[in-house]
Image: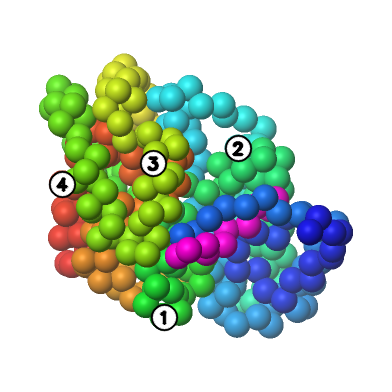
Amino acid sequence: MGRPFFTVATAAPMDGFASSIAAINVNSLKTTFQAQTPTVILGDTEILKNAPYRMIAAGLGDLLGKFTCLCDWKLSRLINREHYCENIAGLVESCVQNVLKDAGKAKDRDPEVLGKIMEGLVLTGVAMSLYGNSRPASGCEHHMSHYWEMWFEQRGLRPVPHGTQVGVATVLVLKLAEKLRGTKVDFDAARESARSYSPEAWERAIHRAYGPAAEGVIALEEASRKNESAGRLARIDAIQSHWEEITALLAELPGSAEVMELLRSLQSPCLPEEIGVDGRLLRDTLLYAKEVRPRYTLLQMAWDLGVLERLSDDLISNLQHL
């Protein structure tokens, strides 16, 4: 409605406080709308420290996702020449680093740390509002979370908090990045795969994976055409020419084991099974969550290279031994 309002936070579990967008389920599909930003946001640490602990941990999970979402943005800058704002990306990175230094104190409900978490979540929302969309704070880790939310809600089940899902998804994306770095990519085979792409087979898979949300996902693809062969072939050329830069970028990400250790120290889930995601749902997530948005991410890059399915199966197999 565009009316001015104040937000008084009773917990800090996600980064939507200052965002100019809202993600809402419409016809079973998580859809983004422009929204009014608050005039004032109040986060009193005396209130925040008394929130249910799972919401405190969820806020940290959402902040951890900024590592992978910024990596996605940098990848798209290299591969698609997508516009990239150093100042806004730097704002988001500083928010995460500021919180991580003392993140372990969150479980003690330390007011100063909770204030940093709240500030980081607000400022990442500001970054989205400044940029005009969620690119600075949402990548494939958020797409995975959106996919899980839709899947659970379609079945009348309540998902865990969004930030908790993002924390788990961040671990998965980091593990996938580690596997991709160790993969010898056959670019000629990737081009062959792109040329043999079947939209009909893709649509069948989307109907199975998305259920009632499938038509909305198919409409997104019809508008963006991100999976079509011509665009994919051009991206494969760009990936090959920038491969050393891309692998160096992936190497800058924190280790998955490091992030898992942090989440465990905060008594927060770090594995899919801990949030109700079984092996079959996880496989669909890794293969099809990239279709939630037309935005370029690590998942789309792995698909472009024809290795997403193999890496996903390898990742799921490895998780069974953790």
Q: Earlier in the sequence, mark 2 or mark 3?
A: 2
Left-right relation of 7 to 66: right
Give the labeled residue for mark 3: 221
Nearest the camera: 253 or 277?
Answer: 277
Q: Position of residue 15 (x, y in %)?
A: 63, 58
Q: Mark 4 or mark 1: which comes first in sequence?
A: 1
| Mark nearer the N terminus (2 vs 1) | 2
Q: Is residue 292 visible?
A: yes
> Regarding mark 4 in the picture, which secondary structure is present there?
helix
Region rendered in magenta: 19-28
Vertical relation: 250 (above or below) 142: above
| Residue pictured at 25% horizontal, 71% vertical | 278
For badge 3, the amino acid type reads Glu
Which element is circle 3 on?
A: helix
- Report which residue position mark 1 lands on: 156
Q: What is the distance, in whole Å, between disc 2 and disc 3 at their CAs?
A: 27 Å
Question: Residue 293, percent across and down?
Answer: 45, 46
**Residue 268 spot, x, y in % from top left:** 45, 73
Rounded to the nearest angstrom, the CA distance separating label 4 from label 1 is 32 Å
Quadrant of the frame with the C terminus: bottom left
Question: Between tags 2 and 4, which lies in front?
Answer: 4
| Residue that numbered label 4 is attached to | 310
In the rendered view, would you say 115 is above or below 235?
below
Position of the N terminus by quadrant: bottom right
Residue named by callout 2: 89
How far, Cα to Cα, is label 2 from label 1?
37 Å
In the rendered image, residue 199, in percent from the top left (x then y), is placed at: 24, 40
